[in-house]
Image: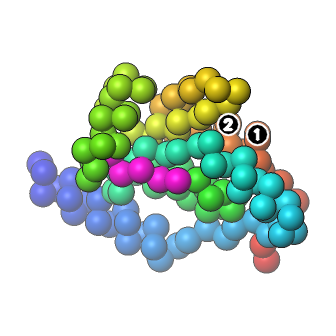
């Protein structure tokens, strides 16, 4: 079973590599503002998790520079996720707003949150 997961994970990563989404083109000052806002966000993920790939593709599609933290390969990030979020489940978006930290676990919820906060559908790169 572990071998099947490994193979499927590699297939997912290959497809993701071969079909990258296009990012949003923004004026430099607007992108700098968004980059400053995304400094308070961090995505805990596993490299080959299909739901994590889905969220990372949304980050790229929306040109969001959010720190990604591999909770499978880093014991530090794994412990942060367990202590802060309460569960070793990925993807998980850590959101710090107004001195308060929130942990968001569902990929669809994470994407909806990011798109409602940062997306500009009329400016997708050609």
Residue at horizontal 52 percent and vertical 38 percent from the top: 93
Residue 97's quadrant in the figure?
top right
For label 1, the SS is: helix
Residue at horizontal 49 percent and vertical 45 percent from the top: 43
Q: Nearer the viewer, residue 94 or 99?
A: 99
Quadrant (top left, top right, bottom left, bottom right) of the C terminus: bottom right
Q: Is residue 96 left or right of residue 6?
A: right
- Which residue was labeled with disc 2? 113
- Which residue was labeled with disc 1? 116
For label 2, the SS is: helix
| Discs 1, 2 touching: Cβ within 8 Å | yes
Range drawn in magenta = 67-71
- Residue 97 is tagged as none
Residue at horizontal 37 percent and vertical 35 percent from the top: 80
Q: Is residue 76 above or below residue 98?
A: below
Secondary structure character of the magenta stretch overall: strand
Q: Nearer the viewer, residue 3 or 119?
A: 119
Q: Nearer the viewer, residue 36 or 8?
A: 36
Image location of residue 33, percent across then percent down: 80, 55
Q: Please indicate, yes or no, whether residue 108 appears anywhere in the rendered image.
A: no
């Amino acid at each position: 079973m572990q071998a099947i997961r490994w193979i499927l994970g590699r297939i997912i990563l290959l497809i993701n590599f071969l079909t990258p989404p296009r990012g949003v083109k923004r004026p430099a000052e607007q992108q700098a503002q968004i980059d400053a806002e995304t400094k308070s966000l961090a995505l805990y993920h596993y490299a080959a998790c299909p739901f994590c790939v889905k969220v990372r593709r949304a980050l790229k599609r929306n040109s969001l520079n959010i720190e990604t933290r591999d909770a499978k390969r880093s014991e530090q990030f794994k412990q942060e996720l367990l202590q802060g979020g309460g569960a070793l489940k990925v993807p998980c978006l850590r959101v710090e707003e107004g001195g308060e930290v929130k942990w968001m676990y569902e990929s669809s919820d994470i994407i909806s949150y990011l798109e409602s906060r940062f997306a500009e559908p009329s400016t997708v790169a050609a």
